Amino acid sequence: MKSAEAVDVVIIGGGIVGTVLAKGLAEKVGLSVALIDAADPKQTQESNTDFNPFTDTRVIALARRTVAELSSVGLNLEDVAKQHNGELPPEIKHIEVSDKGHVGLLNLNSDDYHIDAFGQVVSLSTLTRLAANASSAYQYIAPAKVETVTQQKDAVNVALDNGERLTAKLLVLADGGRSGLAQQVGIAKTVSDYKQTAIVFNVHAQTPHQNKAYERFTKNGPLAFLPFDSEIEGVKARGNGFSVVWTVETEAAKALMKLTKTEFIKALQNAFGYRQGKILRVSELASYPLMLVKAESLTSHRAVVVGNAAQALHPIAGQGFNLGLRDLSTLIDVLSASSSAHNAQQNAADKREDNSESQAVPEYLPERFDAGAFDVLQRYANERKQDRNNTITLTDTLVRTFSNQYFPTVIGRNVSLLALSMMPQAKKAFVKHTTGYGETPQINRDRNAAR
């Protein structure tokens, strides 16, 4: 498709964040959008080293609110089943949090909060392809890389390596922060290295998962098991599969990655225990370093960062992707409300002119809504501030608390887990944050919730 010379919004980054945003802004707000992606959408070979969003082998846990917000932009997880022989993404109905070698234990059941599930587990590449194929309302330019970005008073100019040139009222960076474009548009970032590495892989266990997820804290770092049936060595899991994120100190991760599969399974079994019986199979391993990367500002002149480009979090408690999706829903809502208000003002001004009223129009209104106007972006930044700060603080505190073997800290966190397990209001607050908004009133229970 030939690119337009001028659009309302240019989005850089064609992963799930950029793709969902492009669909939402084009279809729900009615803006003209161009999505620029460096990855080749025609690539189909899965990779454990190159995280192309269309072939990324990683699995993500979508919080309950995230599932609802994806549905609101026309992305229903039921459609994922059409790509997988009718197999729906597994729901998380039970969560067990434990501290290896200590007494701290917390169990959460979705029925207790009058919700059908805490969330669902889905392949990142499957979700990205679902989103990419769900709309033709925006321009999609790929593979293409940004060569230069120039911010002007009334627009942002973007030059691509394929020779195309675009101008937009608003530039959205959804590229995960790897390109350095945020710094080019004046958005600085702070980096805190956790000196840990996440090893990601799938396993088959001896017993069915029964929609249960685990977060187990070990001396090296957290170990997360999410219910997810994958194929390993030609064998498809039948309700006994898990996606695993094993967080360990970087040097320990290097040693683990060098083990044979038999040795690796033995080490994993020792860390996780026999909650699901024996671990039967393990897939190929992928890994990536962990750090907290936080944009000091979400906006600059006619530019905004979203998703991992705004904040890259530790995978503990699975909050990073869900926080990024809330960036999108807020930006869509803000632009939708601002566009509607502009159109209402414009219609009112037109009526006054048509009626030849003597009173003057208060100020000039541009005919076209300006998606990159200062007041619009400031409203977005203000609305994201509290949720963003709270989630970053929660994640960072969990990392530093549960990766620390200092004896008083170990005692404190186990006391906290035990106290949390015995305090309904505290558990409710924890569920509220980790699901995006928590329990629903009893009279508004989900249709599938246990009664």
Image (cartoon, helix red, strand yellow):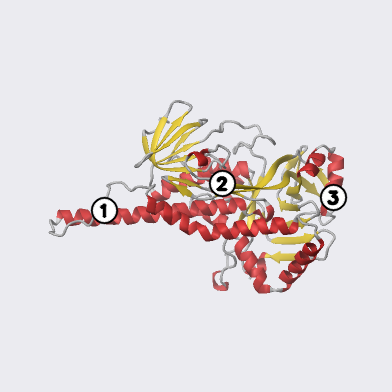
**Which of pointers 1 and 2 lies earlier in the amino acid sequence?**
2
3 or 2: tag closer to the N-terminus: 2
| Disc assigned to residue 269 | 3
Q: Which residue appears at 87% of the width and 46% of the height?
A: 266
Q: Which residue ends up furthest to the top in the rendered image?
A: 163
Q: Name the residue under label 1.
A: 346
Check disc 1 and report its element: helix, strand or loop.
Answer: helix
Q: Residues within 10 Å of mark 2 (few under 14, many from 20)?
A: some
> Callout 3, which amino acid?
Gln
Q: Do the residues labelled 3 and 2 touch (CB within 8 Å)?
A: no
Tell me how far mark 3 sits from mark 2, CA to CA. 38 Å
- Residue 7 image position (x, y, % from top left): 38, 39
Viewer-proximal residue among 230 and 86: 230
Q: How far apart are marks 1 and 3 (CA)?
A: 65 Å
What kind of residue is marked 1?
Answer: Gln
Q: Quadrant of residue 31?
A: top left
User: Considering only order in the chain, which callout, 3 or 1, is on the residue closer to the N terminus?
Assistant: 3
- Decide which of 29, 238 is in the foreground and name it: 29
Residue at which label 2 appears: 189
Classify mark 2: helix, strand or loop. Answer: strand
Horizontally, residue 144 falls left or right of residue 352, namely: right
Across and down, in percent, residue 114 comes to 62, 69
Q: For mark 1, does the 10 Å Cα neighbourhood hold few (<14), some (14 to 19), or many (20 or more) residues?
A: some
* Residue 125 tag number: none
> Is residue 210 something that shows in the picture?
no
